[in-house]
Amino acid sequence: MVAVSRSRWAGLLLAAALTACGGDKEKPKEGEQPAAAAKPVDGYQTSWTGYVSKTFPGALADNAEAVKSALRSLDLEITGESGGVFEKSLEAEAQDGTSLVASVKEVSKDQTRVSVKVGYLLGDKDAARRILSEVEGRIAAGKAEAEERKRRWRPSGSGVGMTATTTTTQPAKR
């Protein structure tokens, strides 16, 4: 008799939990997107495991160097580096002993995703966002520098001082 009432209570609790979690959802109004399909406003994505991620334009090698530069500028000591062709992983440590893991993955030829976790277990999401903000600044500075180089660059042999026809000289006859 006790086992029957316990299973009945368990069934009622399960039904209540399912109703609370998945209950009747209102249909979205015309022109309105459901919340799950909406993109994050600031571009940051947060995982349950404590990683904060953002996608940046640029090649893997350039963005990995930007991450290293940002970590050094924030006085974080890079303690380990590993990776392959499509992914680089960096481990760093702050002066107070806080650990950091950064992962740079190639999403496409000209886009990479940088994920940062500061601390243990669930991570410090605010610190990770500050680090990603510094990375974003480094990437923007690198992009501006490349644009400036392109603007100043002039191809050699642009025609200045050259004539359209060329003459050849033959060796003197003896």
Image: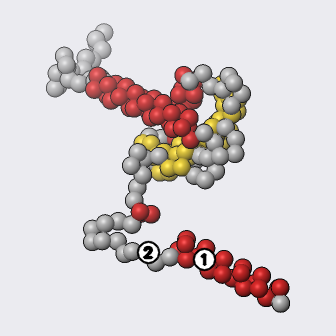
Q: To which quarter of the image does residue 26 belong?
A: bottom left
Q: Which numbered disc flags the more N-terminal residue, 2 or 1?
A: 1
Residue 93 placement, left or right of 143:
right
Colour mode? secondary structure
Residue 150 placement, left or right of 48:
left
Q: Where is mark 1, residue-wise?
A: 16
- Crowding at label 1, few (<14), some or many (≥20) Cα neighbours within 10 Å? few
Q: Nearer the viewer, mark 2 or mark 1?
A: 1
Question: Which residue corresponds to the image point at 54% horizontal and 38% vertical from the top-left?
Answer: 126
Name which residue type carries label 1: Ala
Question: Which residue corresponds to the image point at 37% horizontal and 25% vertical from the top-left?
Answer: 145
Name which residue type carries label 2: Lys
Residues at circles 2 and 1 in contact by the CB criterion of under 8 Å: no
Q: Is residue 85 above or below residue 5?
A: above
Q: Secondary structure at mark 1?
A: helix
Q: Is residue 83 above or below residue 20?
A: above
Q: To which quarter of the image does residue 82 belong?
A: top right
Do we see residue 5 in this rendering?
yes
Q: Position of residue 103 (x, y in %)?
A: 60, 42
Residue 99 placement, left or right of 26:
right
Question: Which residue corresponds to the image point at 71% horizontal and 81% vertical from the top-left?
Answer: 9
Do we see residue 64 in this rendering?
no
Q: Secondary structure at mark 2?
A: loop
Q: Position of residue 165 (x, y in %)?
A: 17, 25
Q: Where is mark 2, residue-wise?
A: 25
Q: CA distance from mark 2 to mark 1?
A: 16 Å
The C terminus lies in which quarter of the figure?
Answer: top left
User: Front-most of 161 and 104?
Assistant: 104
Q: Position of residue 36 (x, y in %)?
A: 44, 63
Q: Position of residue 102 (x, y in %)?
A: 61, 39
